[in-house]
Amino acid sequence: MVFPEELLYTKDHEWVRIEGDTATVGITAFAQNELGDIVYVEIETLDQSVERNGIFGTVEAVKTVSDLFMPIAGTIVEVNEALADEPELVNTDPYGAGWMIKLKLEEDANAADLLAAADYKKQVGADA
């Protein structure tokens, strides 16, 4: 299982790519593997400010629905529209075409408790 080194991770299995004052967020390969085939992604928080650990959407797999948790405080400025027609992108390319949201970070956004790839690997029991 792949966990790109340049990303940060949450204990709730989201990944974050921070570039300046913007961040891209999705769910990890581990999370999509645990959920199984993704059939629907619902994100209705565009243009909304969401606090860290707040729910920004849901992902539906064949057998379950899971909340998506905001890894860092910010205002959602873009939603991956491709997921409306191709939710399976979350399964096939979770760190690329399967991204979920882009957000403008809050000034006081705190990324201190996000995990490096090696720490996330240990959390999920993958080889470090």
Image (cartoon, grey):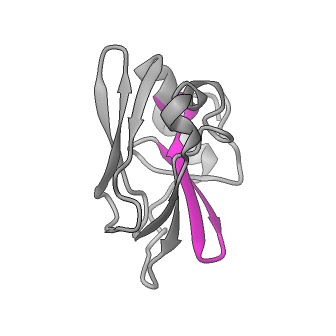
The answer to whether residue 20 is left or right of residue 113 is right
Q: In the orientation shown, which residue stands out farthest toward the bottom?
A: 107
The answer to whether residue 28 is left or right of residue 57 is right
**x, y percentage for residue 19?**
67, 69
Location of residue 11 with respect to 2 vertically, above or below: below
Q: Residue at x 48, y 68 (%)?
A: 111
Q: Residue at x 62, y 46 (%)?
A: 117
Closer to us: 120 or 21:
21
Q: Quadrant of the N terminus?
A: top right
Q: Residue at x 49, y 74 (%)?
A: 105
The answer to whether residue 107 is left or right of residue 97 is left
Q: Which residues are magenta?
A: 14-31
Residue 24: in magenta span: yes
**x, y percentage for residue 71?**
42, 57
**x, y percentage for residue 45?**
35, 58
Location of residue 16 with respect to 124 vertically, above or below: below
Q: Residue at x 48, y 69 (%)?
A: 112
Residue 25: in magenta span: yes
Q: Quadrant of residue 88?
A: top right
**x, y percentage for residue 51?**
31, 67
Q: Quadrant of residue 12?
A: top left
Magenta residues, dominant SS class: strand
Q: Quadrant of the C terminus?
A: top right
All told, the count of numbered labels is: 0
The answer to whether residue 94 is left or right of residue 37 is right
